[in-house]
Image: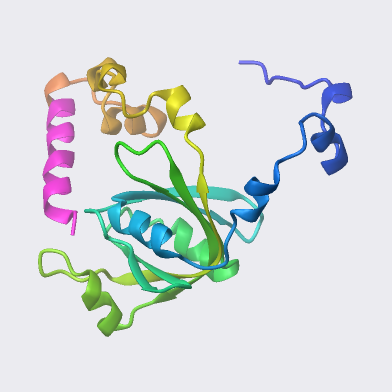
Amino acid sequence: MKETQLKPEFLVKDEEDLRSLFPQTHALAVKKCQNHLDKHAMDFVARSPFLCMGTQSPDGLADVSPRGDPSGFVKVLDDKTLMIPDRPGNNRLDSQTNILANPAVGLLFMVPGFDDTLRVNGNARITCDPDLLALMAMKDRMPTAAIVVTVEEVFMHCAKAFRRSKLWDPDQLQDRSEMPSLPKIILDQTFGTPDDPEEMRKIDADLEDEYKRTMY
């Protein structure tokens, strides 16, 4: 597929160009940004079972990683500090290596059924302090490490994106079987899918078994 070429005369070159395209923001949108977690932000974090975390590599490449657990999995240590457990994954460690090089992170907290989201920006460190990890044990297993975020900015984000997408609308749920399984997609992208359909079914089943064994 041929790469799309953008017309240079329509490219936004700087912040002045950008702001000329939009009406001026209202004072409340600016003033709502806080430098700490108030009672509403703490309540939102306690209800949230899912967040997306943005980091940046030493080369400036952006990355967004999903994090999920039962509601309240992110611990509020104080009004300036959050702690996120680092559960077992694929061990690429993209977010963690990025944090070691550049501690700036952005978090987007979601609550099922809520169209509003909570945005938190700050600086992160990685700890393996057993006393802190014990606070996040699941099924008698502690996470290997935790990401501790020092909060710099906190604000609620309006509902427009979620209402446009109808993300929580049950009528909008799509049939997962309409796309190949995750193992098949990855094999298509790498080593190739086995010719034997039964072997592919076994690979899919093995992944489900691995989920059950290694979630915590």
Q: Quadrant of the N terminus?
A: top right
* Residue drawn where x is 17% and y is 32% of the image: 204
- Residue 84, picture quadrant: bottom left
| Up-down relation of residue 149 to residue 201 (above or below) | below
- Residue 207, picture quadrant: top left
Q: Position of residue 11 (x, y in %)?
A: 82, 28
- Residue 79, picture quadrant: bottom left
Q: Position of residue 15 (x, y in %)?
A: 83, 43
Q: Is residue 200 magenta?
A: yes
In the rendered structure, the answer to whether residue 193 lies left or right of residue 55 reads left
* Residue drawn where x is 67% and y is 51% of the image: 30
| Up-down relation of residue 54 to residue 87 (above or below) | above
64 or 149, nearer to the observer: 149
In the rendered structure, the answer to whether residue 102 lies left or right of residue 76 reads right
137 or 151, nearer to the observer: 151
In the rendered structure, the answer to whether residue 60 lies left or right of residue 163 reads right
Q: Which residues are magenta?
A: 199-216
* Residue drawn where x is 27% and y is 16% of the image: 171
* Residue drawn where x is 26% and y is 82% of the image: 130
| Up-down relation of residue 117 to residue 189 (above or below) | below
Q: Main secondary structure of the magenta part?
A: helix
